[in-house]
Image: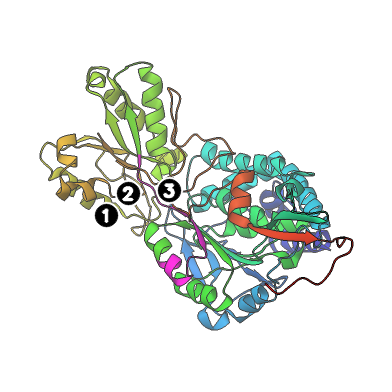
């Protein structure tokens, strides 16, 4: 049916636009897709819908998104209003607390999701599909093609990891002998049932897809909310998953503002919510949801260069990549660099400055900052420069000759030197360690992320696919990508004590105790 609909849609496109326009738009567009990244523009806007109870739906309210590169209205999103959340509440409420599957119910669905993962991994591995998603990511969260493609490749590798029996192995249980014959204690990985996933803008495919599939593998029914600025990517990914056999009723997909989503969470009462985003909102949700939450929140990430000066060219490249790739919009982006005095004569800072100046808007190695305006970054820099001894090492200026709208940031890769003795003063510490989610770092901390990178080749933004990325030391900390993370975040422990006898011979009624 989906192929028939796709062919009808393409045939209609030919009639509307003519064969030449059809060839231009759809020659390299996968069959599941409803958009073409190259064609999305103010004159040819794309549309993002919601998905609930097995059907794509719209809303009474359309929110227009502006192109981060030129300010044109280029995508309209059907944003659900508070009065429209009833179908989503009902959908989650209809999911039993024992989930869509568990070790004792519908175990064949573990194998089904192994098959779905295999098909989806195969599709994402096809050049036309990986290119489609990489370019779609670039349209809404501008980053270099290499960075966008890496996000697709990480997602594809994750799906490969959970093909075949690997989903079933996530639910591996154990048994402990009891006190007598016929008794045993059995521990199971048990789903929560109805759950929610809220993810940010900076990784439009990787973060929501990995968390979504983890939730599904363990037997939960999720409602997924991605930042509306980039939700078109998961709109298309859900269509790919449906084409790979994912049951339509397994996942709901909502676009809304934060207030509406908060109301949905309170009314639907999901048994677990995964939130990736700012620590301020994380704390509010933790209170509203009475602790039924796992968090991947923001981080101020630091790098320390010890006294052994070596491989200066490589270290300079790593520092540049960690601080400025994706315009600094990574949770693990390098926020502050501590250098031992031995590095002062190594030429490291000059090399970092030279590397930062290679970054150009033309190839999106530097680009729009989607959550911090230019004026905010300038203000932060001016406040830092009020600290005695502080100075701009490089950058410190807005990008030039661009059409990025003012609601977004446009700033050159920037580094500000702050003396360590001044950082330690209580009046300065909060200012210096304020996270700026953009191409901005202090040279010369603390980190809330649970992944530590160590060694000469260590990169804060160079983790392999199978890494942990939740705040350490916090029981609410969430992970992503690994079997351990999936089991911790998306399942709980359930114990079942079997005691099947037989009764002892000559059993008699004992005295009351």
Q: Label 2 vs label 1: CA separation?
A: 9 Å
**Quadrant containing the C terminus in the rendered view:** bottom right
Q: What are the residue bounds of the magenta stretch?
A: 284-301
Residue at image coords 59%, 39%: 466
Count neighbours of disc 3 (C-alpha within 10 A) and say few if under 14, some if 14 to 19, many if 20 or more: few
In x, y percent, where is residue 194? 64, 68
- Res 90 seen here: yes
Q: Point out the frontmost of discs 2 and 1.
A: 2
Q: Quick one: which residue is furthest to the bottom in this view?
A: 83
Q: Position of residue 172 (x, y in %)?
A: 73, 48
Counting every numbered tag in the picture gives 3
Q: Nearer the viewer, residue 225 or 396?
A: 225
What separation in Å lies between label 1 and label 3 (alpha carbons)? 31 Å
**First reached walking from the N terminus: tag 2 or tag 1:** 1
Q: Residue at image x 30%, y 33%?
A: 337
Q: Which residue is the site of mark 1?
A: 376
SS for tag 2? loop
Residue of label 3: 473
Instruction: Pinpoint residue 1: horizontal percent, then vertical percent.
Output: 84, 63
């Amino acid at each position: 049916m989906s192929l028939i609909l796709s062919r009808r849609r393409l045939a209609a496109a030919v009639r509307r636009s003519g064969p030449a326009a059809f060839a231009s738009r759809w020659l390299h567009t996968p069959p599941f897709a409803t958009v073409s990244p190259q064609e999305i523009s103010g004159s040819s806007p794309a549309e993002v819908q919601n998905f609930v109870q097995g059907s794509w739906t719209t809303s009474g309210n359309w929110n227009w998104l502006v192109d981060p590169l030129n300010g044109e209205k280029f995508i309209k999103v059907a944003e659900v209003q508070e009065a429209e959340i009833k179908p989503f509440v009902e959908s989650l409420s209809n999911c039993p607390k024992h989930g869509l599957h568990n070790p004792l119910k519908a175990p064949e669905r573990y194998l089904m999701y192994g098959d779905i993962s295999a098909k989806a991994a195969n599709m994402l591995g096809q050049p036309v599909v990986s290119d489609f998603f990489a370019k779609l990511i670039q349209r809404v969260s501008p980053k270099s093609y290499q960075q966008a493609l890496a996000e697709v490749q990480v997602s594809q590798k994750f799906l490969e990891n959970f093909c075949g029996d690997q989903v079933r192995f996530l639910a591996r249980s154990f048994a402990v002998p009891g006190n007598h014959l016929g008794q045993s204690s059995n521990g199971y990985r048990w789903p929560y049932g109805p759950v929610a996933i809220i993810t940010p803008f900076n990784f439009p495919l990787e973060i929501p897809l990995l968390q979504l599939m983890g939730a599904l593998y363990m037997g939960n029914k999720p409602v997924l909310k991605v930042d509306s600025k980039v939700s078109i990517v998961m709109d298309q990914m859900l269509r790919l998953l449906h084409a790979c056999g994912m049951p339509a009723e397994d996942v709901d997909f909502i676009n809304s503002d934060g207030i509406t989503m908060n109301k949905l969470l309170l009314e639907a009462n999901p048994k677990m919510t995964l939130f990736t985003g700012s620590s301020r909102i994380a704390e509010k949700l933790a209170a509203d949801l009475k602790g039924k939450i796992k968090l991947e929140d923001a981080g101020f990430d630091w790098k320390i260069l010890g006294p052994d000066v070596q491989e200066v060219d490589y270290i300079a490249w790593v520092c540049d990549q960690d601080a400025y790739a994706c315009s600094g919009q990574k949770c693990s982006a390098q926020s502050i660099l501590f250098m031992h005095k031995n590095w002062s004569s190594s030429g490291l800072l000059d090399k970092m400055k030279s590397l930062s100046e290679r970054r150009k808007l033309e190839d999106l190695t530097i680009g729009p900052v989607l959550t911090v305006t230019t004026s905010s970054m300038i203000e932060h820099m001016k406040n830092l420069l009020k600290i005695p001894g502080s100075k701009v090492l490089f950058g410190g200026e807005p990008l030039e000759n661009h059409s990025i709208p003012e609601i977004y940031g446009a700033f050159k890769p920037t580094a500000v030197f702050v003396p360590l003795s001044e950082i330690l003063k209580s009046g300065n510490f909060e200012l210096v360690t304020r996270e700026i989610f953009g191409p901005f770092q202090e040279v010369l901390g603390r980190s809330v992320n649970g992944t530590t990178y160590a060694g000469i080749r260590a990169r804060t933004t160079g983790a392999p696919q199978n890494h942990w990325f939740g705040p350490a030391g916090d029981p609410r900390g969430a992970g992503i990508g690994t079997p351990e993370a999936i089991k911790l975040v998306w399942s709980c422990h359930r114990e079942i004590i079997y005691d099947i006898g037989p009764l002892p011979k000559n059993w008699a009624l004992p005295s009351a105790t």
